Amino acid sequence: METNDNANQRVQKILVVEDNKQTRELMQLFFKKAQERRDLNCIVVESEDGEEAMIMLESEQPDIILCDIGLPKKDGFEVLDYFRNIRNPATPYCFFTFITASPEERSKAFKERVDGFISKGDLNYFNFTLQIRSWLKLAELERERENFY
């Protein structure tokens, strides 16, 4: 288990699944800035397609998954189905969040009961880091609750 030397806490992990290079680079910039400002303390791993993401779900055991819907090889909905079928006991609670630009995709994702959305059109540092921090905190609290019982 990876830990933060300062607080001796588990460092949480985020899996970003995004094939659009510009969107991925913008999120990389946000994560880097957030790490520098100490707004976030997490490890970020990336995948550019759904097939690779499915492999990484098991090997990386992320706390948050930020997944585009329109992906090569396997789309975001296929990744979501796979995630639900392989739910790992080591990460009993993980936020699955869709990155989307279209209201139609958002509507379909809502019906699939994903945990959240990040709109490509509204990506800004403040809202992005605020949302990520809240999901990381909720995942941490859920993990503590699971360990308590």
Image (cartoon, rainbow, N blue to C red):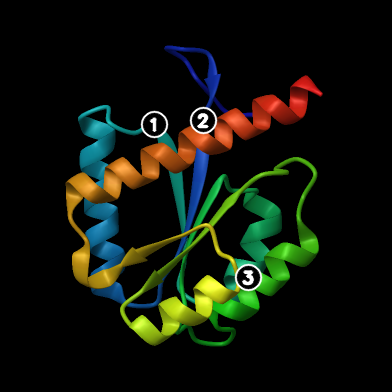
Q: Which mark is residue 104?
A: none
Q: Please identify the quarter of the rendering in which residue 143 is found.
A: top right
Residue at image position (19%, 49%) is 125
Q: What's the amino acid at mark 1?
A: Asn
The x and y percentages for residue 132 are: 38, 45
Residue at image position (66%, 25%) is 144
Q: Residues within 10 Å of mark 1 (few under 14, many from 20)?
A: some
Q: Please identify the quarter of the rendering in which residue 78 is found.
A: bottom right
Residue at image position (28%, 50%) is 128
Please identify, in this view, whether the residue under mark 1 or under mark 3 is nearer the observer. 3
Looking at the image, do the residues carrying marks 1 and 2 touch, with CB atoms under 8 Å apart?
Answer: yes
- Count of numbered circles on the image: 3
Q: Is 117 placed above or below 50 here?
A: above
- Image quadrant holding the C terminus, namely top right
Q: Which residue corresponds to mark 1?
A: 41
For the residues marked 1 and 2, what is the alpha-carbon distance in whole angstroms?
7 Å
Q: N-terminal of the two: label 1 or label 3?
A: 1
**53 or 140, nearer to the observer:** 140
Q: Which residue corresponds to mark 3?
A: 80
Residue at image position (51%, 30%) is 11
Q: Which mark is residue 11?
A: 2
Q: Residues within 10 Å of mark 2 (few under 14, many from 20)?
A: some
**18 or 141, nearer to the observer:** 141
Residue 31 visible here: no
Q: What's the amino acid at mark 2?
A: Val
Q: N-terminal of the two: label 1 or label 2?
A: 2
Q: Is 76 placed above or below 2 here?
A: below
